[in-house]
Image (spheres, grey):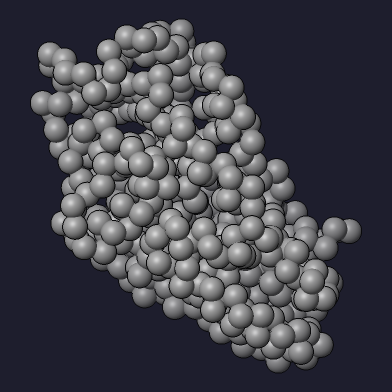
Amino acid sequence: MSTNETRTGPRRVAIVGGGISGLGAAWALNHHPDRFDFRLFEAQEQIGGNAVTADMPQDDGGSIPFDISVTACIPSVYDHIVLLMEQFGIELLDTKFSYSVKYGGRIYAHDFDSDIREQLQPEIERFQRLLQRLHRFGWLSRSQSIALNALNPFNYISMGMLLNLGGFSGDFRYKILKPMFVNFLMATNVFDMPAALFARYLEFFDIESATPMQTWDQGTRRIYERLSAGFGDKIYLNRPVQKVYRSESSVVVEDGAGERETFDEVILACNANQTLMMLDRPTALERYLLSSIRYESELHNHTVVHSDASVLPDNEVKPLTTRSNHIEQYGARPDNYEITYIMHNQQPWANQSDKPCLVTYNPTSPIDEGKIIKKWWFQHIVHDVRHMAVLVNLFRFIQGRRRTWHCGAHTLINSQETCFVTGLAAATQLGADYPFDDPAAKRSFNFYGSILYGSRFRKVPQ
């Protein structure tokens, strides 16, 4: 039975993955219990995917929540997430992104007169001029038109190539530019990124000043709790999916224990490499797309949540009390970084904690085991030129085929907003109604949906 045929009773849908894209799909389907009967399979013990909220124990027996990966947003480009928070009564609080770097015993910070700044100031100024030239083409990317976006020549050139052509030094790249990017982008292969996307990020972040941002009160956990409140009984935690078998009439999902359930459709809201492992007899195009997606194999994978302030230097830039992030280079490679998120400075309510709230990625400094709260492992996608210019545009040819729908960061771009939209789009393609009545959100939804599904996308009337 095809997705367009009628059937008696609600359509059974399996959703694999409980991150923001899978939850977005489930939330949209849950508005229509007469149309859909779904189950969400999550391998971990909690929902949220890469957006994890930890709790710092307090001496009075309580605890302070704070995020350890997805920590803030820029509301002007988070249309759907902002609407969700308004609907759930979750407040956005002001914060700022302010980082410091320790490199070879020397210090850099955007507001600190250091010898690194003095040495590299001519390159900083030259880079700002390069950004101005890139931003002249930025309106093509902001236009929310696939045709105009395709005309931006910097979609097809990596930022690394531009830096090479511009003669920018390794000192500038690894002491200033890359440390800033690895903080807010959760990735290290940033110079493989299309120059247009790189410049788009730098419309919001400045290498010479602190960046105003906003964060969700009490952490992302509240968003996911509210989002899933109406269908908690349909979420299967600690139940990884091992295989997905597809036929002309149904989809069979097999979990790690070998138990099988039959569905009409499956929404795959997990990483591309996990999806490829699950699919029984994937098509040639599925194999090509899913195996071509790159993930980080270096930094931002291994994470320690703790309260040991000894990982931060006691120097003039005062990272423990004044910075949101601190980066320290180590070893022979110029881009080996230990990265610490200083969450009691980054999320305002966490500054009430009676001990530091710290998240250290790629830890090399000794951390007191008695001060460790949690250890985590993340996998982050690499948005290189091939991914953005080629692979993303090919997903439309496998969407909905063989009763299978794909969503998540690898189908578009890695942000809470766009991942949520990919889940909503999968649900609306199955027949759910678009759940918002906001002109700006509708425009962005139609733009992203057209990228995901091409001419088959069911646009929302404006």
Rendered view: 227 above or below 69 = above
x and y percent of residue 403 in the render? Answer: 36, 21
Horizontal side, residue 329 vs residue 417: left or right: right
| Towards the viewer: 28 or 193 | 193
- Identify the residue at image location x=18%, y=47%: 435
Residue 354 in sight from this viewpoint: no
Horizontal side, residue 57 vs residue 423: left or right: right
x and y percent of residue 424 in the render? Answer: 30, 43
Rendered view: 271 above or below 253 = below
Quadrant of residue 255 in the image?
Answer: top left
- Identify the residue at image location x=31%, y=52%: 446
**How many numbered discs sit on the rendered protein?**
0
- Identify the residue at image location x=59%, y=22%: 284
- Identify the residue at image location x=57%, y=32%: 290
Rendered view: 346 above or below 317 = above
Pick out the residue farthest to the right: 332
x and y percent of residue 242 in the render? Answer: 50, 17
Quadrant of residue 161 in the image?
Answer: bottom right
| Towards the viewer: 316 or 11 | 11
x and y percent of residue 363 in the render? Answer: 70, 53
Instruction: State the quadrant of the C terminus.
Output: bottom left
Residue 418 in sight from this viewpoint: yes
Instruction: State the quadrant of the N terminus.
Output: top left
Horizontal side, residue 54 vs residue 160: left or right: left
| Towards the viewer: 237 or 11 | 11
